[in-house]
Structures are given as C-alpha cells and as structure tokens.
Image (cartoon, rainbow, N blue to C red):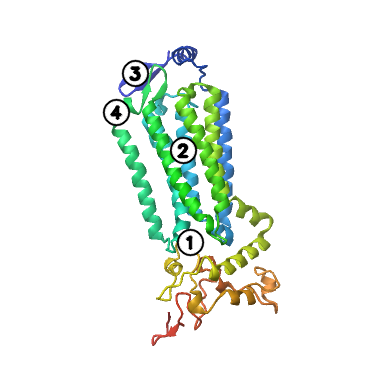
Amino acid sequence: MAAASIGRVVQPRIDQDTREQLLSSMFHVDASNPDDDDTITIAVCSGLFGLTAILLVYAWCNYNYRPIRAKNLTWTTLIYCATVLWFIGNLVTNNHVRIVGAWSNCKLWVLWFRVFFVYVFATMTIVRFYALDRVFNQKKPFTRRSSLISGAVILSFNVTYCLVNQLISSSLTTEYIPSLEACKITMAFRIAAVSVQWVLWGACGVLIFRLRNIQSSFNEFRESVAIFLVIIGLLTETSVTNLHYEYYVFEKKRRIQKTYVDVVASVLVIWLFIGYPVYKSIFDRKSYEQMWLERLAKDGPGNTYDSSNPQGTTAYAKMDENLDSGFNNSQINYEGNGINSAYLNNHRPFGDEDPFNIESGMSTHVPYNDNLLPMSLRNNIHNPLLNSPSLFGGNHMNLQSNGRHVI
C-alpha cells in the first residue's frame, strides 16, 4: 500500500475502492473517486479559459480600436486572472484531483485560492462599476491613483479575511482528513463565505442600478444587468449546493455540475464585458466605430459630459493629466470652448468618407475631426493643435520667451 507524507507523519494511502465504500456509508451519498470524467471536466473548463484568453489577447492587440479601449481592459484582464486562479482552487475544493501530496494543503487551495479569488473576482467587478459611477454620476475623476487605492483596498480586505481564517483553528474552517484523502469544510465556514459573497454582489447591484441613467457610448447598463443576473444565479446555486448538499464533492455529478456552473458564469462575465465591441471590430469594424464616435460626440455637451466648473476645467480633464485612465471620458470644457449641442448638430465630426481610410483622408473630403473626442480616445494625442482653445480650459496656448507653448 502506498504511503503519503502529512507533515512529518507518514500515513498509508487508502485503497480507492475502500475509500468509495467508506465515504458512501459515512455520508449516505453515492461517492465516487476522481476519474476520467473529472479529467474531461478540467480539460473542457481549461478550453473555455483558453478561448477567453484569445478574446483578451485580440482585444489588447486592437487596443487602438476606441470602443474596445473604452472597456478598461486592465481591470477586465485582472478579473479574468482571478477566475483562472479561482478554478485552480476548485480542483481541490470540488475533489477533481486525488487529494494527496501538495494537493492536501486544504487551507492553501480552499481558502487562498477558492475563497480568496472568488472575493477578488467580486470586489474587482465592483471597482470596475464604481469607476463608471464615479465618473458619470459623481462627476469625479478615476485616475491611476484612484485605481491603485482601489486595488489596495481590495487586497487589504481579501487578505485580512483570509488571514483571519488562516489563523483560526483548522477544525473551525477546513482541514485535511488523511484517512479519507479529503478536505473537510465546516458548515460555519461555508455560511460565512457564502454570506460575504451575497453582501459583495448586493453592493455591486446597487452600483449597477446607479448606472442606469448613463446616456452615452460608455453605457454598460444592459451588460451590467446581464452580469448581475448571471452572478445571482451562480450565488443561488452555490448557496443551495454548499448548504443543502454538504458532501456534494464526493458525488461525481454534483461536483462536476458545480465546477461547470462556476466556470461558465465567470467566463460569461468577461465575454459580457468586452465581447460585443470585439465582435463588432471583427465583423463591422469601421461603421461601428464611426457610429460609436458620433454618439460619443453628440452625448458630450448636453448630457453626460456637461461638467464644467468655475475654474474652467472639467473633472475629466484632470483625469488625463497622466493619461492613465480608461474612463477619462471628457476633457472638453464645452462652455469654455464654445462647443455645444447646436454646434455638433450643425458640424458632423465625420465627412462623407470613412474617417479611418487613409486614401479618403488625402482627398478633398473633410476627414474625421479627432479633436472633438475625449483625449483618451484620440489618435492624434501627441500632435496638439497649437494656438487653439485648450482642452483643459477656455484659454489659448501662449508662446513663452523660451519658445514653448503652454496652456
């Protein structure tokens, strides 16, 4: 009989047929050891993550496509990474591998991978929605500093929660049972973990509700509602599975179902975030971007981006001081620059030709006026128009004695 080392104690490994019979009699379930079906589950889920990775790689390769650029790819990519690490934690938590050797460290895989990255997934999604709320509803910038602070808060919250559970006795959270080659997860730990998830996604629901009135190209309300419904379905399934079927990990059908639900839901969130602009960039690239940019320009003055202040600088102008935010949606002081809804209605930002066609740009037709766009979405950002109204206020650039133009 093979042996497994647990700390400094060598434990004999239980025969797999004996293990199934023992688990079935102890917990009154149809117990099954990890087998080829579990391996297929791991392969299929890995394939879903692989397809999603291709989606993200394509999005990054087409980052200059402005409808994609507006989707805050950095946070979306980090959310994707959290789902992958969450899945790795599921391999042990849902008993898809034989829990021996390195896999027998239950607190590592259950607490620091499964629970920790489920919370990271939730909190990072909250921050992504909060960024939109802060910019469009609160009329405040979401800068690199804001992003770093949000990341620090996320890390602190999740690490603190998991560290407290790490220091608590394993008998109260999760511990390895060598005689069963299984991780025992207490009901109190399950209830606490699921409850925190409901609180986090409840807060996310409040933010999504606040985003309902954003009337612009940045509006993600429909996608957000779809994401919220997916997550509520996932949380309901998680609650029922963990609280009603306490020993589901020993039943092959239930553990496979749980893993598929987790993976499909988490991957679907990523696709709902960026799938549509990626699809459009492949099948309707030029006309969709033209329509998107026209809508963005028309929305600005009268609706979302009307945020001028006494200093003649919008909150969004401040966001572009470091050119660091995917949500810096309007650096234009419409009142200071004299740009208003009537102007945009009478001066279409596009000519008759496609604005991104190089040949048409050399013709006599008027090309797309990139200067009407928010700075974060321009292509000519390194070629500012000198002696023209400043994007950061109502003044013109002045020529200094040293020959430099300043605002």
- Residue 125 visible: no
Three-letter amino acid code at the position of disc 2:
Trp
Upstream in sequence: badge 1 or badge 2: 2
Observer-nearest of 236 and 63:
236
Q: Which residue is mark 2?
A: 86
Which quadrant does the N terminus fall into?
top left
Q: Which residue is mark 3?
A: 10
Rendered residue at 70%/77% (across/down): 363
Which quarter of the picture shows residue 162?
A: top left
Residue 241 image point, x, y percent = 49, 28
Upstream in sequence: badge 1 or badge 4: 1
Upstream in sequence: badge 3 or badge 2: 3
Q: Is residue 214 above or below residue 244?
A: below
Q: Residues within 10 Å of mark 3 (few under 14, many from 20)?
A: few
Quote the CA–CA distance across marks 1 and 2: 32 Å
Q: Which residue is mark 1?
A: 136
Q: Which residue is mark 4?
A: 169
Three-letter amino acid code at the position of disc 4:
Ser
Circle 1/circle 3 CB separation < 8 Å:
no
Observer-nearest of 109 and 255:
255
Circle 1/circle 2 CB separation < 8 Å:
no
Q: Is residue 47 above or below residue 328?
A: above
